[in-house]
Image (spheres, rainbow, N blue to C red):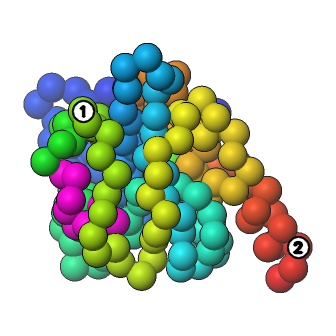
Amino acid sequence: MPRSFKLEEGISTMLWWQRYPIAGSGLIIVHDPPGKKRQVLLLEEKKEKLALGKPAGSKSFPMETRLESENSPVETLWRLLEEELAGTMTADLEISETPRGLYQLVPGKWLLVFWATSHTGVTPTGRWDAEVSGHEWNDLAEAVELPTLRQGAKEALRDRRDGLQGRICDRCEVPPLMKQLLVLL
């Protein structure tokens, strides 16, 4: 069951992050086009990492695995902006200063999620790394129910849809696409 957290005044957020083995950072980007439903930017995962609940072909918001050389999840977030969004839309983004949620993708692997708003709804163009492609805006309410979401995406997207900040999700649902792969293994 998800819990809530609050970053208390005077406590370093770095200390708070160190309480969990953060395996990566994620960024849920929404856009509110006039007269339309709220949109969320999704992409397709091209590289499989089953140990993190990520089959090739699954859909997700931008997520990036933290490298051992990175001192904090914020460094991972900056690399995510460059690699998964190719730096093309970053000037348009208003990114939350503090994390909005923490999700255990698989046992012992936690994703720290930040929120962002795109004011123009620009779709990223340019160089994408070999791990992602197919960036597109999707209706946020419908995106939560996509059967092709990677592990952890559903819970984080649902929290964003519902405006629930400060969530700690101890157990993320294994999505249908991942269940199919596990049966084959």
Q: Residue at x 54, y 76 (%)?
A: 46
Q: Residue furthest front?
A: 35
Q: Nearer the viewer, residue 6 or 174?
A: 174
Residue at image mark 2: 183
Q: Residue furthest top?
A: 35
Q: Residue at x 63, y 64 (%)?
A: 58
Residue type at numbered disc 2: Val
Residue type at numbered disc 1: His
For the N terminus, the quadrant is top right
Q: Residue at x 74, y 51 (%)?
A: 147
Q: Nearer the viewer, residue 53 or 38?
A: 38
Residue at image mark 1: 119
For the C terminus, the quadrant is bottom right
Residue 74 in the image: above or below residue 39: below
Q: Residue at x 11, y 31 (%)?
A: 10
- Give the mark nearer the N terminus: 2 vs 1: 1
Q: Is residue 89 left or right of residue 180?
A: left
Q: Residues within 10 Å of mark 2 (few under 14, many from 20)?
A: few
Q: Nearer the viewer, residue 18 or 162?
A: 162
Residue 142 in the image: above or below residue 87: above
Percent position of residue 143, x then y = 60, 40
Q: Is residue 51 magenta?
A: no
Q: Nearer the viewer, mark 2 or mark 1?
A: 1
Q: Residues within 10 Å of mark 1 (few under 14, many from 20)?
A: some
Q: Is residue 83 magenta?
A: yes
Residue 33 in the image: above or below residue 129: above
Residue 131 visible in the displayed image: yes
Q: Which mark is residue 72?
A: none
Circles 2 and 1, Cβ within 8 Å, touching? The answer is no
Residues in magenta? 82-90
Percent position of residue 175, x then y = 73, 54
Residue 85: image quadrant is bottom left
